[in-house]
């Protein structure tokens, strides 16, 4: 690939950029699925997943239904780095539309491979290019007219396709790791719910029913339920209050000029998956002062303190921070609360899965406020009360959950390496510094 060729983004479009449909919350629930900001920030490649549904007329459908390969950009965001964020729609078995805070770009497939430009806009170089048109008023945003005039690389279509295929191999590996982790975590979560929420072993023993756990484990559970102010709980269990069992440390606020290249990174709102969980690609390189207790070590729990949507699928949700090869030190941002066990009766795995229960989610939601951005009250976590099992049972659960958490750490470390590799390869491939065949051989050796 000789030299870097460029053109205006608008020259690569099959049709003009188009903002999505506006549908208030009261009009949602039936009809066609709609990609919202939540999906764009959760999925870099938007798959066939459940979404809000809205009514779309036949005339609107002709203009606003998505096609596989359509690029979607965040037109507005309450956080600076969210403006202009790009995702790609991967297709669906049924028609799907998109909301008004998003801009759709439909590429001319004769001269532009959508996946190539998705990877470009997700890369460090692409994000820096996008930053040149972001405007900051009450919220950060981009205009379609500016996006059209943005200068982007334009190698040959054959080279675009080859680069997209190479980077797609890395993304597929990352997605596979994510799905494996989700399966492992779901199994541990189901066990936690059975033992510590539904009290299945206790209820089975109390009712004289058979149960699925070995006798050596079953003997650790009481034989009957008793009344408490939280409802029925196993006999001899206590009512625990998180404020008596953990410490909760608020992260550091930061300025945009502190987000510069460094061996330190901030755990931010982008580090949280919707409905709980950790995103290794959500870290932001950071160069600033911080307190020692604001350092987050791999394996520690953070809880989201804010949410930029009223859906409240992030605020109050927990994540376990995972190790990364790229950064030596991780620091919690003001959007994250570090929760550390102070009592041997609770552990990181126990607290993490406790934070995903309906009771905890409902409790934290009742402590949120805000009309645009949701904020979690400082009293939310300490005031939560729950049935506290004996330390021995918690240790038994940990022995099972640790297997899932260790696997999550291993795959997250691998994914972090793949993220970095993807961002490193793209500019080298575009410039011609690295040939297509050499890149393919290099990835084959790494995978």
Image (tube, rainbow, N blue to C red):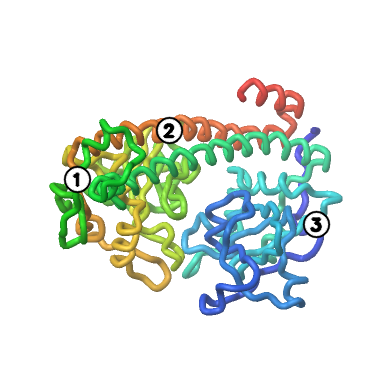
Label for residue 82? none
Q: Which quadrant holds residue 150?
A: bottom right
**Position of 87 relative to 292 (above/below):** below
Q: Please state the horizontal and vertical placement of residue 324, each as a whole percent of the image.
A: 44, 33
N-terminal-most mark, 1 or 3:
3
Q: Is residue 26 left or right of residue 156?
A: left
The crowding category of the residue bearing disc 3, from other C-alpha atoms within 10 Å (few below 14, some 14 to 19, many at least 20), is some
Residue that carries the numbered disc 3 in the rendered image: 11
Q: Quadrant of the C terminus?
A: top right
The crowding category of the residue bearing disc 2, from other C-alpha atoms within 10 Å (few below 14, some 14 to 19, many at least 20), is some
Residue that carries the numbered disc 1 in the rendered image: 223
Q: Which quadrant holds residue 361?
A: bottom left
Residue at mark 2 to residue at mark 1: CA–CA distance: 37 Å
Is label 2 or label 3 in front?
2
**Position of 15 relative to 339 (above/below):** below
Is label 2 or label 1 in front?
1
Residue at mark 2 to residue at mark 3: CA–CA distance: 43 Å
Identified at 31% across, 43% down, the residue is: 289
């Amino acid at each position: 690939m000789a030299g870097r060729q460029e053109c205006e983004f608008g020259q690569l479009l099959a049709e003009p950029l188009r903002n999505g449909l506006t549908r208030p919350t009261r009009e949602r629930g039936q009809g066609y699925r709609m990609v919202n900001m939540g999906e764009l920030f959760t999925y870099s490649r938007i798959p066939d997943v459940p979404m809000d549904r809205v009514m779309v007329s036949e005339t609107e459908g002709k203009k606003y239904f998505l096609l596989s390969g359509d690029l979607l950009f965040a037109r507005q965001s309450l956080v600076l780095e969210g403006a202009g964020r790009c995702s790609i729609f991967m297709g669906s078995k049924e028609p799907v539309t998109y909301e008004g805070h998003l801009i759709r770009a439909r590429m001319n497939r004769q001269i532009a491979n959508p996946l190539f430009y998705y990877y470009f806009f997700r890369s460090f170089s692409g994000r820096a290019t996008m930053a040149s048109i972001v405007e900051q008023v009450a919220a950060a945003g981009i205009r379609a007219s500016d996006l059209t005039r943005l200068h982007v690389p334009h190698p040959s279509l054959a080279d675009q396709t080859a680069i997209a295929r190479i980077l797609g191999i890395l993304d597929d590996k990352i997605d596979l790791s994510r799905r494996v982790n989700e399966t492992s975590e779901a199994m541990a979560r189901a066990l936690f719910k059975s033992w510590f929420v539904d009290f299945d072993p206790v209820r089975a023993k109390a009712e004289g029913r058979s149960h699925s756990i070995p006798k050596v484990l079953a003997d650790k559970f009481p034989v009957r339920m008793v009344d408490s102010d939280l409802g029925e709980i196993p006999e001899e269990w206590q009512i625990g209050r998180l404020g008596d069992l953990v410490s909760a440390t608020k992260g550091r606020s930061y300025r945009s000029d502190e987000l510069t290249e460094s061996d330190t990174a901030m755990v931010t709102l982008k580090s949280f998956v919707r409905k709980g969980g950790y995103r290794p690609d959500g870290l932001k390189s950071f160069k600033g002062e911080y307190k020692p207790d604001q350092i987050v070590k791999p394996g520690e729990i953070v809880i989201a303190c804010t949410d930029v949507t009223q859906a409240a699928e992030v605020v109050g949700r927990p994540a376990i921070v995972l190790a990364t090869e790229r950064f030596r030190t991780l620091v919690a941002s003001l959007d994250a609360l570090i929760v550390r066990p102070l009592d041997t009766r609770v552990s990181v795995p126990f607290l993490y899965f406790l934070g995903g229960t309906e009771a905890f989610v409902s409790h934290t939601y009742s402590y949120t406020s805000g009309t645009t951005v949701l904020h979690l009250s400082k009293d939310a976590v300490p005031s939560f009360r729950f049935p506290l099992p004996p330390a021995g049972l918690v240790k038994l659960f940990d022995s099972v959950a640790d297997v899932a958490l260790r696997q999550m750490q291993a795959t997250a470390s691998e994914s972090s390496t793949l993220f970095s590799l993807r961002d490193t390869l793209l500019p080298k491939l575009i410039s011609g510094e690295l040939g297509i065949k050499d890149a393919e051989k290099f990835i084959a050796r790494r995978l």
